[in-house]
Structures are given as structure tokens and as C-alpha cells.
Image: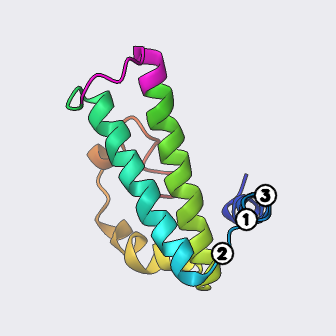
Amino acid sequence: MDLKNLSDDVEIISRVYARVHGVERTDDWLVLKLHEEVGELTQAYLDLSGRSRDRGLSDDETRDAFRGEVADALAQLLLVARRFDVDLPEELERKWFRWRHLVQPEDTAGIRDVGGSV
């Protein structure tokens, strides 16, 4: 699945969520919701790393909760980017991938061959 289709799918589900729960998806709601999701991801990480109170979850439940919060944070970030017309591939190119010329073989170890595009 590419980023555009992923963003479209997340947008649809966010609209469903807003309709079902009577939420107005304003600009500040989207950003505040992202903050909430990052907070929940942080809590799930603390649980996963054993630095939180015992919530009575099994190891599998704790890992599942963490993975779910990563997905929630990503989905909310996609919604924020969409609302504010941020071209994520373009911004990643500008902010991150401008460092491609510094890639060394050890940087790609276990990911892919250096001959492939980064």
C-alpha cells in the first residue's frame, strides 16, 4: 500500500469515527488528537519496557497494545499532514533523504544491498 492510498483510507475511517462519535474534526482537534495518541504510545512503551505499573496484561497483550498505539500515532499523523497539505514524500526527501549521499554499506546492513535505492 502506498502512502497516498494509506492516507485516503485513514481519512475515511476518521470521518466514520467523527460521525459515529459526534466529533468535529477541526484543525486543533487533529493536532491535539495526535498528541493524545503519542501519549498513549508512550504509555504503551513504558508498559512494554517494564517501567509502568502492572496493568495485568500478558506479554502478548502488552506487545499488541504497543503495536496498536504505533498504528494510531501514524494514522493521526497522516491526518494532520493531509489537513495541512503536507506532501510527506516531498518533505521526507527535503528533510531526510538529502543525506543519501552519505550512506555507507554498514548503514544498510540487514536492510538491503547498497546497490538498491535508499
Residues tagged 3 and 1 counted as in contact (Cβ below 8 A): yes
Under mark 2, the amino acid is Arg
Look at the image and give the residue range highlighted in magenta. Answer: 53-62
Prevailing SS of the magenta stretch:
loop
Inspect this view and state whether residue 109 appears: no
Residues tagged 2 and 1 counted as in contact (Cβ below 8 A): yes
Query: Label 2: which residue?
Result: 25
| Residue depicted at x 73% and y 66% | 22
Marks 3 and 1, how far apart in space? 6 Å
Residue in the foreground of this view, choosing between 24 and 111 = 24
| Residue depicted at x 62% and y 69% | 79
Question: How many numbered tags mark residues here?
Answer: 3
Residues tagged 2 and 3 counted as in contact (Cβ below 8 A): no
Tell me if 25 is positioned left or right of 32 in this view. Answer: right
Magenta highlight on residue 54: yes
Quadrant hosting residue 85: bottom right
Mark 1 is surrounded, within 10 Å at the Cα level, by few (under 14), some (14 to 19) or many (20 or more) other residues, namely few
Residue 5 drawn at (x, y percent): 76, 61
Residue 82 drawn at (x, y percent): 64, 77
Marks 2 and 3, how far apart in space? 12 Å
Residue 77 drawn at (x, y percent): 53, 65
Residue in the foreground of this view, choosing between 47 and 101 = 47
Identify the disc placed on residue 18. Answer: 1
Under mark 3, the amino acid is Val
Inspect this view and state whether residue 38 appears: yes
Secondary element at tag 1: helix
Query: Label 3: which residue?
Result: 20
| Residue depicted at x 73% and y 51% | 1
The image shows residue 28, relative to residue 63, as above or below, that is below
The image shows residue 59, relative to residue 41, as above or below, that is above
